[in-house]
Amino acid sequence: MRRVLIANRGEIAVRIARACHERGLEVVAVYSEADRDAPHTRVADRAVAIGPAPARESYLRGDAILAAAQSTGADAIHPGYGFLSENAAFARAALAAGLTWIGPSPHAIATMGDKIVARQTVARAGVPLVPGTELSLDDPAAIARQAAAIGYPILVKAAAGGGGKGMRTVADAAALPDALAAAAREAQSAFADGRVYIEKLLRRPRHVEVQVFGDTHGALVHLGERECSIQRRHQKIVEESPCPVMHDRLRAAMTGAAIAAARAVQYTGAGTIEFLLDDSGAFYFLEMNTRLQVEHPVTEWVTGIDLVHTQLRVAAGEPLGFTQHDVALRGHAIEVRLYAEDPAAGFLPSPGPILGLREPQGPGIRFDSGIDARTIVPMEYDPMLGKLSAWGPDRATATARLVAALRDTAVIGPRTNIGFLIDVLTHDAFGRGDTHTGFLEDHVPRWTPRGADRTAAAIAAALLLDSGHATAGGPAGNPEQPSPFAALGAWRLRT
Amino acid sequence: MSEHHLRDGRGPVRVRIAPNGDEPRVAIDDDPCAVARLQRGPRTHPARAITEPMSFDLDGVPVRALVSRLDDRVSVVIDGELYVFDSGAAADPPNAGRLGSGRINAPMPGKIIAVLVRPGDRVTVGQGVIVLEAMKMESTLNAEIDGTVAQVTAAAGDLVEGGVLLVEITPA
């Protein structure tokens, strides 16, 4: 393995490129027309255009990506997360083209990627399941009967799904037909597979997942758990390790189930088994993600193991290099996802140019970023700007560091969820570790920015921007705009 | 010395500012604020904007701000909080979502997935009228008032710009 093509964009492409360079591997980036000059193209040794902005005409085009690998002499493909990372046909095509696939076997991807087959497979391995149908559902009348038998509320999910796409909560039978239609449509558009299944919606469970790693020599270990309960629109926004309510007996049971699930498909590489944990301590298999996870940095913080380096080693046929006994969890790590979205307006995505950016710094702080001061956040993709994570010897210290880092972060241009994340992390319930998937509904419904407490400072800063520059000419090509403060009488602060 | 009239959430604010090196004099509503130790970072011009990091003490309290002006709008971030000032002349941002309006506008650029109503339909508050896909997520836009659909200006498959009218509802 010498030259790795990264079939992805944004922060994860940048993060993988870094690991490749650290291991002396060359990097080939691919990009769509919307990502020309994006940070992930600039950290690569070579960058190849693969198509127009819409993902299905670029990042989802396996043929274009394999052609890019061939034309650049790449000998391996890292798919990142999302896009083609859990597409077994693409993995097979990459292997057939003679490339090293940095991920699990196509068989493992296909088995776990079909959520219905996955449920059947892990159930046979003795892993507990959320009550739901294990049937492929093409008959609306049958679905309605099954939904009634499971009992509302239920969750409609895409069989090929992930990332909350194609997922709908259904409160009662009347809402079922619309939810099924919408979920199937979204699933069809996101995964080219419109099949859906249904599951009982548990009340206020925690979302706890186990990171596993296997090599091609038969070793299979876990790297502890992550709790990712705080979600909006079924997408995680806060992730931490360890889970605040974890104890030795529960960890032994949950990691044991995770290993059993992974062993059922002879898993190799990095994978994550997701569970729901209820307040009685019972847990249920949700799904297995056969790829690197967005939230992998919190595991790296507490284990000291670089997951992407390990992926590269395993893909090259080397042994893991550590045993279960070597894996020790140290301290506490928390990650938040920074999104270009407006939390005061239903988390609507907020694309557009970045006008100003200040990245946080400090001990125990890590910023996995996919943007820089000249990025235009495209409307075609997931609006995540990056991930901010913090480590501390204990949960309170990690939280305090993360909050300070968020206050230290500034993004101007798109609206962001930074203020919202600060309010979540400083909420008493979060401090107590009282987290569950209904956290935002219960504790931060109808969020509005606090603002106002530093209005005088903001006014001073706004005016100082023009003060002293009133007669200065701008640099060539960027003529200074006339000051609106000088030209207009009444100004207002928008909230 | 220059004088500016701003408006914040509580009402009009009069600000006077006199350049004075790194200790400009600023008065907000005749209340003088002492600006000290002003340091201005490198100025950049992304996408026609003027952006500058700065730090100063305001009445002895340290302030670290990132400031950016684009056309008639100035954005300031302090302690993770965003403050936006504008002239009041600009249209409401597409995300503002005025409550109780009969006009359903596209909150952002996207693709119309489904139109759930037809002219003449009676709708109630909260009823879905348009399904819009943007940034890979489907969002249902709901009626904000009870009424009758007066016009529908979008069709499934349309690509729409942010802020354009999609459906108009006449109040019941």
Image: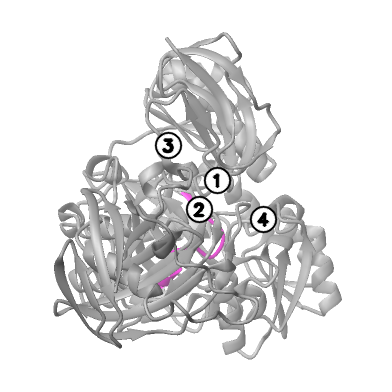
Q: Residue at x 14, y 76 (%)?
A: B59
* Residue B97 marker: 3
The three-letter code of the residue at mark 1 reads Ala
Dots 1 and 4 on the same chain: yes
Mark-to-mark CA distance, 2 and 4: 13 Å
Choose between A270 and A30: the one closer to the eye. Answer: A30
How far apart are labels 1 and 4 at the CA level?
Answer: 11 Å
Label 3: element kind: loop
Left or right: A30, with B33 as reference point? right
Q: In the rendered view, would you say A475 is above or below B48?
A: below
Which residue appears at 35% of the width and 81% of the height?
Answer: A361
Residue A238 point in image, percent of width and height: 35, 58
- Count neighbours of disc 1 (C-alpha within 10 A) and say few if under 14, some if 14 to 19, many if 20 or more: many
Q: CA distance from mark 1 to mark 2?
A: 8 Å
Task: Give the numbered dot on residue A118.
Answer: 1
Nearest to the eye among marks 2 and 3: give it. Answer: 3
> A442 or A154, which lies in front?
A442
Taking the view exactly as shown, the residue that stands out farthest to the front is: B1
Regarding mark 2 in the picture, which secondary structure is present there? strand
Q: Secondary structure at mark 4?
A: helix
Residue A298 in view, yes or no: no
Judged by depth in the image, the label closer to the viewer, 3 or 4, is 3
Instruction: Tell me whether marks 3 and 4 sit on the same chain.
Output: no
Q: What residue type is disc 3 on? A: Gly
The chain ID associated with circle 4 is: A
Q: Pointers 1 and 2 in contact (CB under 8 A)? A: yes
- Which region of the structure is painted magenta? A287-299
